[in-house]
Structures are given as structure tokens and as C-alpha cells.
Image: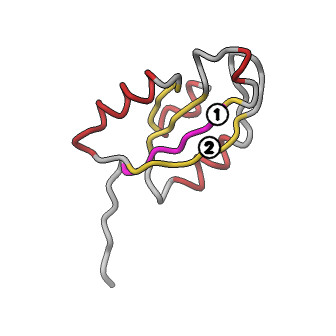
């Protein structure tokens, strides 16, 4: 059986706060993960609430993450008003 290797950080899952107009400087959360962990992140985000307003998160899409440019992605998404984190931080931060 052939094993297919997947980059640990290959995918950004982006979630908007349902009440982001109450705090437009912080639009939502962007979580760095991979396709294997995507279902775990999605199920966790269904139970999470915004720490600013208590609103729920709405799945807004995903982007490919290229390992050499991760620092650029973190900066870009932060500038867009997203709190960025790796999936392993999910339980701790939200």
C-alpha cells in the first residue's frame, strides 16, 4: 500500500463572526491546518463563539497554504482582520 504524504500546514480555513459589524477590526478566525484535520477543525468551529461579541462563526471558505509563505499568509490575514492560528491552538485560544 502506498502512503501519500500531506503537508502539515497546507490549508487555511476561514471563518467570519456572524456579528462582525460589532467589531469590524476583528472579522473572524483563520485556522491553518491540512485536509486530514479539516473535519476536526470544522466540527470544533461549529461549537465555538466569538470572544468579542458571543456570535457564532460562519464558514467563509478556504485557501491553499504554501509552506514557504506561511509568515506572509499570517501577516496578510491579520491585516484583513482575522485572528490567525494553527489548528493545534484551537482548543486553547477560542
80 relative to 72 in the view: left or right: right
Distance in Å between CA atoms under marks 2 and 1: 6 Å
Residue 1: mark in rendering: none
Residue 16: mark in rendering: 1
Does 88 sit above or below residue 65? above
Q: Secondary structure at mark 1?
A: strand
State the quadrant of the N terminus.
Answer: bottom left
On the image, the x and y values in percent for residue 47 come to 74, 39
Q: Is there a contact, CB below 8 Å, between mark 2 and mark 1?
A: yes
- What range is drawn magenta here? 10-16
On the image, the x and y values in percent for residue 43 come to 67, 49
Does 7 sit above or below residue 33? below
Closer to the camera in the image, 39 or 84 = 84
Residue at the (47%, 38%) spot, across then down:
88
Residue farthest along the bottom direction in this orientation: 1
Does 5 sit above or below residue 17? below
Residue at the (63%, 48%) spot, across then down:
42
Q: Which residue is mark 2?
A: 60
Q: In the rendered structure, does residue 12 fall within the stretch colored magenta?
A: yes
- Binning the other alpha carbons within 10 Å of mark 2 as few (below 14), some (14 to 19) or many (20 upward) gives few
48 relative to 13 in the view: left or right: right
Amino acid at each position: 500500500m502506498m502512503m501519500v504524504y500531506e503537508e502539515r500546514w497546507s490549508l487555511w480555513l476561514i471563518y467570519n463572526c456572524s456579528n462582525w459589524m460589532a467589531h469590524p477590526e476583528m472579522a473572524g478566525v483563520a485556522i491553518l491546518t491540512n485536509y486530514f484535520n479539516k473535519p476536526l477543525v470544522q466540527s470544533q468551529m461549529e461549537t465555538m463563539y466569538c470572544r468579542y461579541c458571543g456570535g457564532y462563526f460562519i464558514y467563509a471558505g478556504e485557501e491553499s497554504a504554501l509552506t514557504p509563505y506561511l509568515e506572509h499568509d499570517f501577516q496578510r490575514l491579520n491585516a484583513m482582520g482575522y485572528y490567525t492560528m494553527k489548528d493545534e491552538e484551537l482548543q486553547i485560544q477560542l
